[in-house]
Amino acid sequence: MGADPATLFLISAGIAAAGSAIQVQQTNLQTKEMTRRYEQEKQVSYLEGLQSENARMRDMNTILANNRAVRGASGVGDSPSFDAIQKDIIDITKKDLSSIRLNAAKVNSSYDRAIFNTRQQAFYSNMGSIVNAGTSIVNGWNYYNYYKQPTTTSGVKKGTGASGPPGRNYPVNG
C-alpha cells in the first residue's frame, strides 16, 4: 500500500526544499569559482601593465643612451637643443606610462565590477531559492494538515467549510 496523500505532500515539500538548498550550495560554489577566476585574470592584467611600463622605460633608456653616445661621438659639448630633445623623450615617456597605468586601471576596474556583479547575482539567486524552499515547506505543511483533517459524511473537511485543498476558492457547503 502507498502512503496517504498528506504524507506524500509533506515528502514532496521536503524534496523541493532540499532541491532549493542544493541550488544555493551550487550557486555558492559557482560564485566562488568565478570570483577566483576574475581575481586571477585581474592579477594577470596587473602584471601585463607592469611589463608594458617596464618595456616603455627600457625603450626610453635605450633612446637616451643612444643620443648620449651620438653626442659624445660627434664632439658636441653642452647643447641646449640636445638637452631639450632628451627632456622631450622623458616627457613623452611619462605620458605613455600614465596611459599604460590608466588602461590597466580600467581593465582591473572591469574585473572588480564583474566580481561584484557575480556576487550580487549569487545573493539574489540564493534569496530566490530560500523563498522557494520556504514556500514549498509552507504549502506542503498546509496540504498535510488539510488532508489529515477528518471529513464529515458529506465529504467536507471539518472546520474548513470547503470541499477542496487549501489555497483555492470553493463555495461554502451550507
Image (tube, rainbow, N blue to C red):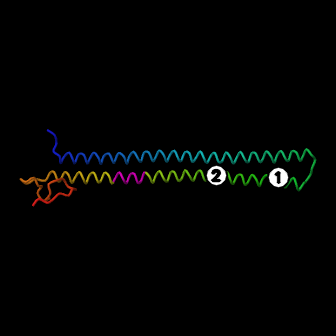
Element type at marker 1? helix
Element type at marker 2? helix
Q: Position of residue 168 (x, y in %)?
A: 21, 56
Which of the 4 quarters of the picture holds residue 26?
top left
Magenta-drawn stretch contains 110: no
Q: Amino acid at mark 2?
A: Asn
Crowd around label 1: few <14 · some 14–19 · many ≥20 (10 Å): some
Depth order, front residue of 4/71: 4
Name the quarter where the N terminus is drawn.
Answer: top left
* Label annotation for residue 86: 1
Q: Amino acid at mark 1?
A: Gln
Magenta residues, start to end: 122-130
* Label annotation for residue 103: 2
Q: Position of residue 137 (x, y in %)?
A: 26, 52
Q: Residue at x 51, y 51 (%)?
A: 114
Of mark 2 and mark 1, the one earlier in the sequence is 1
Q: Residue pushed farthest left?
A: 153
Q: Main secondary structure of the magenta part?
A: helix
Q: Position of residue 128 (x, y in %)?
A: 36, 53
Depth order, front residue of 17/77: 17
* Label annotation for residue 113: none
Q: Residue at x 23, y 51 (%)?
A: 140
> Is 84 positioned to the left or the right of 95 in the image?
right
Q: Residue at x 88, y 56 (%)?
A: 80
Q: Residue at x 63, y 51 (%)?
A: 104
Mark 2 and mark 1 residues within 8 Å of each other at the beta carbon: no
Crowd around label 2: few <14 · some 14–19 · many ≥20 (10 Å): some
